[in-house]
Image: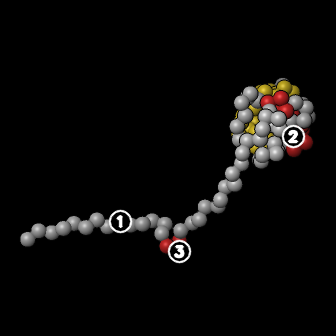
């Protein structure tokens, strides 16, 4: 007489204890007319945000990549030292946020 093995699968995360992940809104990259390298590097771009949001007073040259994405790293000179900030695009209107310099 033989026997038959029946696999048993445990389903982790099923039932009432499962966690629903929040929906992430779709953000499209704004057109180059709205947000571009020159805008980020200009007087009203990254440097202005660093001065207003982080109260930095000696912000110098800002260098961002020519090809933008939803998140890019830019190099900025602060008090004579080269730092990196991450620029995150918030919406299609060209609004963005800048991380503290590291």
Residue 84 in which image quadrant: top right
Left/right placement of residue 87 relative to residue 42 reads left
Q: Nearer the viewer, residue 37 or 55?
A: 37
Q: Residues within 10 Å of mark 2 (few under 14, many from 20)?
A: some
Residue 41 in which image quadrant: top right
Could you tell which of marks 2 and 3 lies nearer the N-terminus?
3
Whole-percent x and y of residue 39?
Answer: 85, 33
Could you tell which of marks 3 and 1 lies nearer the N-terminus?
1
Whole-percent x and y of residue 10?
Answer: 38, 67
Which residue is painted at 76% across and 29% down in the image?
Answer: 64
Q: Nearer the viewer, residue 84 or 35?
A: 35
Which residue is painted at 72% across and 45% down in the image?
Answer: 28
The C terminus lies in quadrant = top right
Say whether marks 2 and 1 touch (CB < 8 Å). no
Q: For mark 3, what is the residue?
A: 16
**Which disc is residue 49 wearing?**
2
**Which disc is residue 95 wearing?**
none
The N terminus lies in quadrant = bottom left
Whole-percent x and y of residue 73?
Answer: 72, 34
């Amino acid at each position: 007489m033989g026997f038959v093995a029946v696999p048993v699968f445990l389903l982790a995360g099923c039932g009432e204890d499962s966690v629903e992940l929040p929906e992430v809104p779709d953000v499209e990259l704004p057109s180059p007319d709205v947000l571009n390298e020159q805008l980020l590097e200009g007087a009203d771009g990254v440097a202005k945000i660093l001065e207003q949001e982080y109260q930095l007073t000696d912000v110098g040259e800002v260098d961002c990549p020519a090809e933008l994405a939803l998140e890019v790293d830019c190099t900025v000179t602060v008090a004579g030292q080269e730092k990196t900030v991450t620029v995150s695009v918030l919406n299609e209107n060209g609004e963005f946020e800048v991380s503290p310099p590291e």
